[in-house]
Amino acid sequence: MSQTVPLDSSRRRLLLQGSAALIAVPSLLRHALAADVQRFALGIASGQPRADGIVLWTRVTGADLPERTTVRWEIARDEAFQQIAARGEETAEAAWAHSVHAEPAGLEPGRWYWYRFEALGQRSAVGRTRTAPRPDDAATLNFAITSCQRFDVGHYAAWRHIVAEDLDLVMFLGDYIYESPNAKDAVRQVEGGRIDTLAGYRTRYATHKGDTALQAAHAAVPWLLVWDDHEVENDYAGLQGQRLQPDFRRQRADAYQAYWEHMPFPKSARPRGADMRITGRLDWGRLARIHLLDDRQYRDPQVCPQPGRGGSNTVTLKDCPALLDPKRTLLGAEQERWLAEGWDGSRPWNLVAQQTLMARYNWSDPADPSTGGGTHWTDGWDGYAPARNRLLGVVAERKLAGVVVLGGDVHSHYVADLKADFDVANAPVIATEFCGTSISSLGLPQARLDAARGFNPHVHYGRSDQRGYMRFTLGAKQLQAILRVVDQPRDPMSGISTAARFMVEAGKAGAVAA
């Protein structure tokens, strides 16, 4: 049961609460059996900002938890919690990992708030969040895109630097966890080897969310999230696993449940078996419409896989003509229609938050007759080129000049021009792409990207040897992008630098170096 009590408004304050301490509440000490039992060990988070509301998340932790426990929450206009905007209670249940998804309503648009939880004798850390502006308000937007934070191969210094950025929100674009066992040269350990059960996924999320830098990033700003493959299994497609296992529907259901349990999604997004909707849309004032896509749950399986396997392969067009099958889809027919019907021509920007590189990336010379048109990786948009052409063809037809595609997955910083058909050499640029590198996951050798650079003239920047994130400043007339790179990915205290800067003018597709 959830209860929301809106209170009077007050002045806006932009003070960041940095405390991570858990504060005991004497009136609730009946359940606090020991001082070292941390009831909010996985931190707190907020997400899905709207003009009048937000989702607040936490998970109650500890070995002695009852089946059901009451969790109180409150959200305030000030960091001292003297001006409470709303408060309520949620029941955390063991069946859903004692997760909490509170949804305060009646909040003021376009302002900062502070929030916290109480349960079983303890109070959580304080988080800072904000609401979106009204759909008809003038606005700016400062945000970062992030993805791919494999725990065992690197540390999360990038998150520590994201906390220091002046952001309105974070967009996380997939691979929050990895289902794989520890790498041979692991920097730190994950439990359980390869995971494919609800218990295994829950443990893996707990390992990731125990990182203090990641917790601080969640507590600093609201997040928008989409998943990719490793939240379930590498390269899965729809209801097909990479290992072609017969019980993959059960595995996907377990993975989706654990994902919802650990992310700031609303109750309405709670999965039903092996289905969970993450596709959504958010208008940020008069500035931008944000489209959140799912390119895993509804896709057709990859064509031309390796023998006895599902998942991706790198193949020539000559050896795999099925790459050009127009019936195949990455988003699914329903989601394709949803996106085509939802483009916004009234705002200067349409931001597409999705999982992977959309621009064509040819790994060999398309003019070489031995390839029949080049070499392509089948798991990304290159494996579904006609579907990409359909999506970008609508952008071209409607003359939507402010479309910016945001992606992750490939562990590289890419900046690229997008065209309705990459096979036409002089086709006009109709959209812009920024595909961010990983927080920690390892990339391909840079020499491979360098060798293919000449086959992809629409790609302005490509670096696979950099870990970090992209930081954006969006205004009505211009988008500014800064590519941030940590110095030492295996060092939790690593410094950071700017690798490149790009700019996109409103009304003119394509990025230019700034």
Image (tube, rainbow, N blue to C red):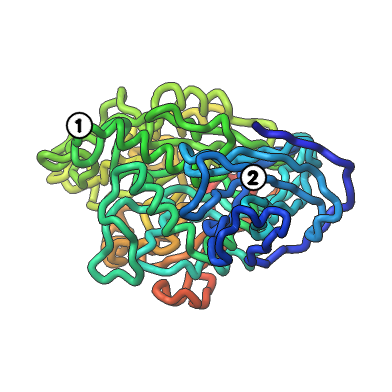
- Cα distance in 3D space between marks 2 and 1: 39 Å
Which image quadrant for residue 301?
Answer: top left
Q: Quadrant of the N terminus?
A: top right
Which element is circle 1 on?
loop
The kind of residue tagged 1 is: Pro
- 13 vs 117, nearest the viewer: 117
Q: Residue at x 30, y 32 (%)?
A: 250
Earlier in the chain: of badge 2 and badge 1, it is 2
The kind of residue tagged 2 is: Val
* Left-right relation of 36 to 248: right
Label 1 crowd bin: few (<14), some (14–19), many (20+), radius 10 Å: few
Q: Is residue 479 visible?
A: no
Q: Quadrant of the C terminus?
A: bottom right
- Percent of width and height locating residue 455: 30, 53
Label 2 crowd bin: few (<14), some (14–19), many (20+), radius 10 Å: many
Identify residue for label 2. 71
Q: Is residue 124 visible?
A: yes
Q: Residue at x 59, y 46 (%)?
A: 57
- 34 vs 245, nearest the viewer: 34
Identify residue for label 1. 246
Q: Residue at x 52, y 77 (%)?
A: 495
